[in-house]
Image (cartoon, rainbow, N blue to C red):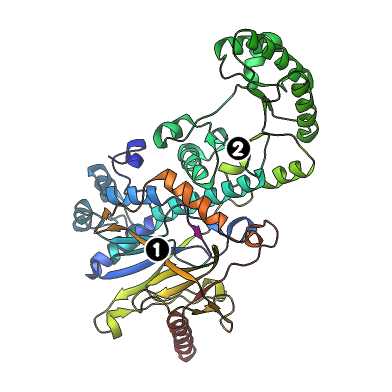
Amino acid sequence: MSQLTDLYRSSLALLTDLYQLTMAYGYWKSGVADRESVFHLHFRRHPFGGGHAIAAGLDQALDYLEQLHFDGSDCEYLASLRGADGKPLFEQGFVDHLATLRFTGTVDAIPEGRLCFAHEPLLRVRAPILLASLVETPLLTMVNFGTLVATKAARVCQSARGEPVLEFGLRRAQGIDGGLSASRAAWIGGVSATSNVLAGKTWGIPVKGTHAHSWVMFWGDEDQAFREYAAAMPANATFLVDTFDTLEGVDRAIAIGHELRARGHDLLGVRLDSGDLAHLSIEARARLDAAGFPKARITASNDLDEHLIASLHEQGARIDTWGVGTKLVTAYDQPALGGVYKVGAVADPRADGGWHYPIKLSEQPIKISTPGIQAVRRYRKDGLLVGDVIHDAVAGAPATPARAWDLDDPTRSFALDGDAEDVLVTVLRDGRRTGAEGDLNAARARAAADLAALSPRTRRFANPQPYPVGLDPVLHERKLALVAKARGSRGKS
């Protein structure tokens, strides 16, 4: 069994929108269900006003695809659905077909932890049209959220300047899976630990935590509360000091720290959860140092995000560890990535090269699709990432140096040179993993390595310098030609 279905249920086939099933029915009814197709999952704008994102959620998506099947209760439910005429929404033959369905396609993807950029495919799915379209919604929900939170976590960790960040968000997360998926993605993005014990068990993420205000409120007296906690957890004594008066709480923690030392233990630290965190941390540090506890760590929480952490650093705060919850796991200032899943090619023996390239038009240029079977070539020079080219996988990788055409301004081109690598790798072939994905710690290491190779100008929060991403000449010229053809046809009708 997979981690995903272990946590939920044996079949997740109905984790989808109804229109995926009505389209699947239409393909089956039309006799084209087995027509080969290629879809791409990408996003159009970088989250949080930044200049990059970190890919995540892929491992769960592959779990889903490998385990995809409609069990008896799924089929029974679908057979019970009725259309507007009161008749069954789906023929029984279609329901019977779903009962035998398994995912048999191939998936190429940007591995978890790699940097990814607007417009380029995070996933490329090649499968019969019924299957490829059926999995749209679950792939989007897993990859969108994972990528969003991993990116947010990396931003928070960047603000922390190498100091540990603890993910404390389960109680504010968007439901059970919102909490679990967020803990996993945040680990990829760079956090040091989570308070989420189930995430720790499931994925091996280190777990950390102190105690709540209710612990102090139960005893009614900080001295007794800290003393009782120290007796229970003598090797893990970090005290939450702001239930009544924060600096008086620090003094009481110091007093209990001396008692711990007399018993052969030590005070690990204090946690600040309210008030002026810069002022309180400076005062707490001074008192701890004066009392002989220079190694006691000061942890801060209280609705932190990358912007507040950066501000606290500017104010000279003496905080050693950052506990970030709500604004990390809910991606507070941008609740959705906005990823989309679009068809780029459909097999057609009558077409040149055996592929038909459909295109979606829009009044908004950013929403015009890119026709073709897309791959991504990434260029690195002197250890730094310098740009990506989205190219046609059938035509092959572009020459080096490569010329690419700007996606936002199709009249502008630029050149890229340096060491080149293909970013998409085959992670699923004929419905089964290739072994190229799944190691969570490897994904975390990839994120750290890629971020270190990205220009600080692109990593900055305000007005990041755009990272060059463009179309190779084959895709660029095909897109322009198909747009012109489609608009010309529409103008004649």
Could you tell whether 136 is left or right of 182 in the image? left
In depth, the one of 205 and 291 nearer the eye is 291
Residue 132: x and y in percent read 32, 62
Q: Quadrant of residue 101?
A: bottom left
Upstream in the sequence, badge 1 or badge 2? Answer: 2
Which is in the foreground here, disc 1 or disc 2? 2
Residue at screen point 45% across, 87% down: 481
Q: Measured along the vertical axis of the image, is residue 447 above or below residue 424?
A: above
Q: Quadrant of the C terminus?
A: bottom left
- Circle 2 — which element? loop
Which amino acid lies under the numbered mark 1 shown in the image of this protein?
Leu
Per the rendered image, the range of residues in magenta is 113-117
In the image, residue 486 lies in the stretch drawn in magenta = no
Q: Residues within 10 Å of mark 1 (few under 14, many from 20)?
A: many
Q: Eyeballing the image, is 362 above or below 164? A: below
267 relative position to 141: left or right: right
> Which residue is disc 2 drawn over?
164
Can you give x and y, in whole percent of width and height, for residue 433 in the image? 28, 53
Q: CA distance from mark 1 to mark 2?
A: 31 Å
Q: Is residue 337 visible?
A: no
Q: Can residue 467 be seen?
A: yes
Badge number at residue 313? none
Quadrant where the N terminus lies? top left
Q: Is residue 46 left or right of residue 111?
A: right
**Residue appearing at x 66%, y 15% in the figure:** 216
How many C-alpha atoms fall within 10 Å of the one at disc 2: few (<14), some, or many (≥20)?
Answer: some
Q: Residue 361: x, y in percent?
A: 49, 77
